[in-house]
Amino acid sequence: MPGRLTRYLLARTVLGVLGVSLLLVGLYAGIDVVREAGDLQRDYDVPEMLVFVARTLPTRVYDIFPFAALIGVLVGLGQLAAQRELVAMRAAGMDRAGIALRAAGAALALALAVMAMAEFMVPRLDAVARIDREQARTGSVGSTEGAGLWLRDGSRMIHVGLLLWTPEARADFADLNVYIAAADGRPVTLVRAEGGTHDGRSWRLERGTRLDLDTGRVEPFEQTVLPSALNPDVFDALATRPRLLPIDDILRIRSYLEANALDAGAYEEAFWRRVLYPINLLAMVLIGLPLLFRPGRQASTAVNVFVGVALGVGFVVVQRISLGLAPVLPVPLGVTHALPALLFGGAAYALLRRG
């Protein structure tokens, strides 16, 4: 009997989480379609827009899944509570903590699958979607499989090995190769640079060499400036946010920034956010479960969902405040990031054990 009850509980939990996930992803997809419809231009028409939205759906799943798990667990177990099935489970030998942990375990298993998707599928799909959209819009962007990003800037073809996202209105690059062509389209100069920025009017390259392809003459430089006709908005559209990168790329970029005495805070936060994703989700789910076992008359599922979402939002707010205080706290960033989950999850579990 306990095994059958466990399977039944897990099935209802998984169905609730998957159903809410599909609903929320569909809602976000509709919003994306409306937003993208206002930017149709050139070769970026309805079919290309729908392909772009479809490619970014896994990103939406990754972003909304913690709240989808919270709402789905409350909906799935709320239906069991409304039908007094939770009471029957407790009469069969399951305590409140056992029921909660089984439900949270089902959500955690789904979260691990979402985390694997975010590691191996989301970065590639999201990057290809944005590159193809900008290529259709501007005709100046391209890429090759595993070979970085290509940009057309007047008579220059620019290969970018690494496009760094920064919270400031600035585009930072690493590992650049700039091919400058003559009037007949023949490349005459190759400029290599370890890093650089784009200020909206020009490329500012650092630590590189200029190679004359006709004479073979090489000139090193510490800094050089090349004029540019590119709209800098394209970089904001193409730069992958740190939270969407695979862990290997996050660590690689973080090491590059630290080696060059640059701010790696966004990538450090992204690393801990990815590593602690399952723990944060588990805390989110546990936050709402004590609502299902309140003594006295049971509240409706809608009320439980509303209160649970409010608690989840409170958890996110506390986590953001904690991360904002991280620079002045004498503890590692990983501990600061995990602390809200440990506090909220521990408090929820203590409430469940009290019964």
Image: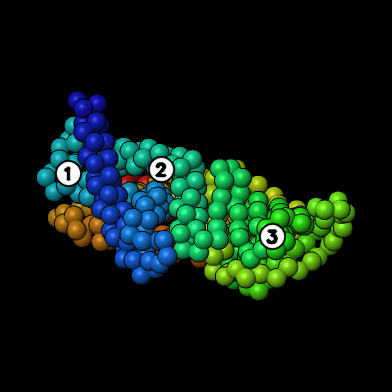
Q: Quadrant of residue 269?
A: bottom right
For mark 1, give the secondary structure: helix
Q: Nearer the viewer, residue 9 or 214?
A: 214
Q: Which mark is residue 184?
A: 3
Amino acid on which disc 3 is placed: Asp
Q: Nearer the viewer, mark 2 or mark 1?
A: 2
Label 2 to label 1: alpha-carbon separation? 26 Å
Q: CB of mark 3 within 8 Å of CB of mark 2?
A: no
Q: Which mark is residue 322?
A: none
Specify few, some or many for label 2: CA neighbours under 10 Å numbering under 14, 14-19, or 20 or more: many
Q: Which residue is drawn at the image coordinates 31% and 66% (left, top)? A: 34
Amino acid on which disc 2 is placed: Val
In the displayed structure, 7 sits above or below 236; it is: above
Q: Which residue is drawn at the image coordinates 38% and 56% (left, top)? A: 48
Q: Position of residue 156 (x, y in %)?
A: 67, 61
Label 1 to label 3: alpha-carbon separation? 74 Å
Which mark sits nearer the N-terminus, 1 or 3? Answer: 1
Q: CB of mark 2 within 8 Å of CB of mark 1?
A: no
Amino acid on which disc 1 is placed: Leu
Q: Position of residue 103 (x, y in %)?
A: 30, 40
User: Mark 2 sits on what residue?
Assistant: 114
Q: Nearer the viewer, mark 1 or mark 3?
A: 3
Label 3 to label 2: alpha-carbon separation? 50 Å
